[in-house]
Amino acid sequence: MSYPELRRRTRQVVLALLERRTARDPFPAHKIPTREQVLHYETLGEAGPTIAEWMVDPLSTFSAIWNQRAGDLLLELLLAQGIITPAEGPDIRAYVASYHNNSLRRHYRSLNLSNSTSIAGRATNMKRRRNVLSILSRSHLEDTFQILHAVDLEPGIYADDEDDPRSINAAN
């Protein structure tokens, strides 16, 4: 089986273990361990992820103890189902680490943590974008300068013209 096919099948198994039909579906709350569960497993080595109750901690990187155990269980499952061979194990483990640290964590943040704080942040950024004035030609820039000077405001905008002393690119 080709490496891209192995990666695709690994992603499918992870989605199934997390009870998600597609990568666009939110993570079910019962598939995300609580902080207390993670700390209990990290300190006592008890009650971590199992094949029957497979969970990942998307708030931590793959190097976290909980996620390492989930990765071990995933490889065992892939081997048991005949999806990978023992020789492919190290390559798939490296892929799972990358997949967890990049895709899974990003998906979790965007799908499950898009709370009012991030919504407010996006709204602020959109408002800032609307307040930025872009002037593409010098004639428009001169018109803007005249309007601003008429109301006694010193503009904070400058041309990119090297011959204009007000330009940020003017030779000093």
Image (cartoon, helix red, strand yellow):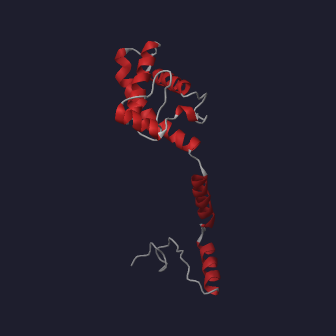
The C terminus sits in image quarter: bottom left
Residue located at (38% from left, 26% from top): 93
Query: Is 3 placed above or below 171 here?
Result: above
Check the image and report above or below for 169 versus 13: below
Q: Quadrant of residue 146?
A: bottom right
Task: Give how far across and how far down residue 57 sits, in percent.
Answer: 46, 36
Instruction: Name the foreground residue: 156 vs 85.
Output: 85
Residue 63 visible in the current orientation: no
**Residue drawn at the location 39% of the way across and 24% of the way down:** 72
Measured from the top left, where is residue 157 in percent x and y? Answer: 54, 74
Task: Say which of 6 and 121 sits in front.
Answer: 121
Q: Horizontal and vertical percent for residue 141?
A: 60, 74
Along the viewing direction, whichever of 12 and 155 lies nearer the viewer: 12
Quadrant position of residue 62: top left
Q: Can residue 76 be seen here? A: yes
Q: Quadrant of the N terminus?
A: top left
